Structures are given as structure tokens and as C-alpha cells.
Amino acid sequence: MSAVASRLPRSDRDERRETILQIAHAAFLEDGYAATSMSSIAAKVGGSKATLYNYFSSKEELFSAVIAERCRDFQEMLYDADLDSQDFRKALTFLGEEAVRWMLRDDSIATYRLITAEAGRFPELGRAFYLAGPQKGKEMLAEFFGRAAEKGHLKPGYMLGMAIHFMTLCKGELQHRKLWSIDEPSEKDIETTVANAVNVFLAAYGT
């Protein structure tokens, strides 16, 4: 079964761990990475610091887990999309619109701002975010593009590069507009930007 057609396992996720991640995420967003301690998170969770360390050996590990959790639903969107069964242009359009909507969510923007603010002092945070989010998403998209090339929809080539180009085209300036509080991109903005992105992408890489 392909990566995009399958689903991430969730049945064995521990409820307590999910609660810790939710509380930790809120704490990091409110206070920043440097000002947030394992002790303060343990107090908000309602348990001892020793209990928290049973789940995560360090604040860095906890933060990485928070970021991975934030990116999980985007990855599941890719898994659940069943892109291979759709008309290729429609599949690209669906994928682009869903990806941009995820990028523009309030929690996604808040997390991106946090990473940007803290990565200068704590470069490991930027790396954790990149590996769990953008890098994983591009790898999954490159796999889909590889299958599309095998079916004759795309020219053979460097699929990871194609994935990077596609996502860059789809988000356009929309993410920056919301990130910098210029305005709130509308659904029409998303649809128009992605439609143009698909046209350019297929003109460059389509067969």
C-alpha cells in the first residue's frame, strides 16, 4: 500500500501523552521556548516533573513531539487524500488547496511565528520543525509525483525538487500576508492562487 493511500496509526496513542502535548504546545506559544520549563508544564499538567520525564527526557524532546503532533494532521491529509484515484489536475488542485488551508490555520501560523522567533537562539528547534513538517510533507509529495511520472502525468526528473516548487507556487504570498498580519486570505484567494500554481506546474513538468 502506498504512503499516500494508507493512514497513520493512531489507535495506540496514549491519552495522557496527548494531554501533555496539548498543554505544552499552549505553554510554548504563550511564553516562548526559553521561558517555558519542564516544571511549569508539569504544574499545568497536574502531575510531578518525574511523571513528565517518564514521557519526555528533555524539554527539547517534548518540543519536538509537540511539533510532530502539530504536523500530523497535515500528513494524514496526504495519506487520506487517495490522490491516485483522481484526475491528476483535480488531485493537484485538491492537494494544493488543502495544504494552503493548513498553512493558514491560526495554530499553524502561531507555531511558525514561534519557530521563527526562537530558532536564532535554539537552532535545534528549527531543525525539529523542518524535519517533522516541511521535509516530511515534501518527501510524501515527491513519492506521489514519482507514481504520477510512472503513469505518464509528469516528466521524469527530480521529484523532491518538483514537490518544493509545487508547494512554493501554491502558498504564493498568502502565508506571508497572514503571518505578518497584513490581511486574512479568503477562500477565493486560495482557489485562485492554487489554480495558477497548478497551471504553471503542469506547464513546466506535465507531459
Image (cartoon, rainbow, N blue to C red):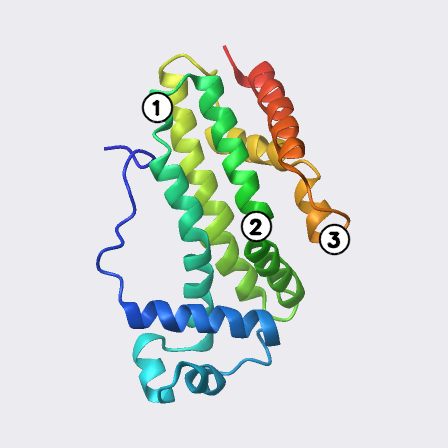
Q: Is residue 2 above or below residue 134?
A: above
The CA distance from mark 1 to mark 3 is 36 Å
Place of residue 21 in the rendered image (x, y in percent of width and height, measured from the top left): 41, 69
Mark 1, secondary structure of its residue: helix
- The structure residue drawn at horizontal position 60% and vertical position 57%, both measured from the top left corner, is 112
Q: Amino acid at mark 2?
A: Arg
Q: Is residue 152 above or below residue 37?
A: above
Which quarter of the figure has residue 198?
A: top right
The CA distance from mark 1 to mark 2 is 26 Å
Place of residue 33 in the rendered image (x, y in percent of width and height, measured from the top left): 57, 74
Mark 3, secondary structure of its residue: loop
The answer, for residue 32, to whether it is visible in the render is no
* Residue at image mark 1: 84
For residue 180, which numbered disc appears in the image?
3
Left or right placement of residue 150 versus residue 171 in this view: left
Mark 2, secondary structure of its residue: loop
N-terminal of the pair, mark 1 or mark 2, is 1
* Residue at image mark 2: 105
Where's the N terminus, which quadrant? top left
N-terminal of the pair, mark 2 or mark 3, is 2
Place of residue 23 in the rendered image (x, y in percent of width and height, measured from the top left): 45, 73
The CA distance from mark 2 to mark 3 is 14 Å
Q: Is residue 78 above or below residue 145?
A: below
- Of 148 and 84, nearer the camera is 84
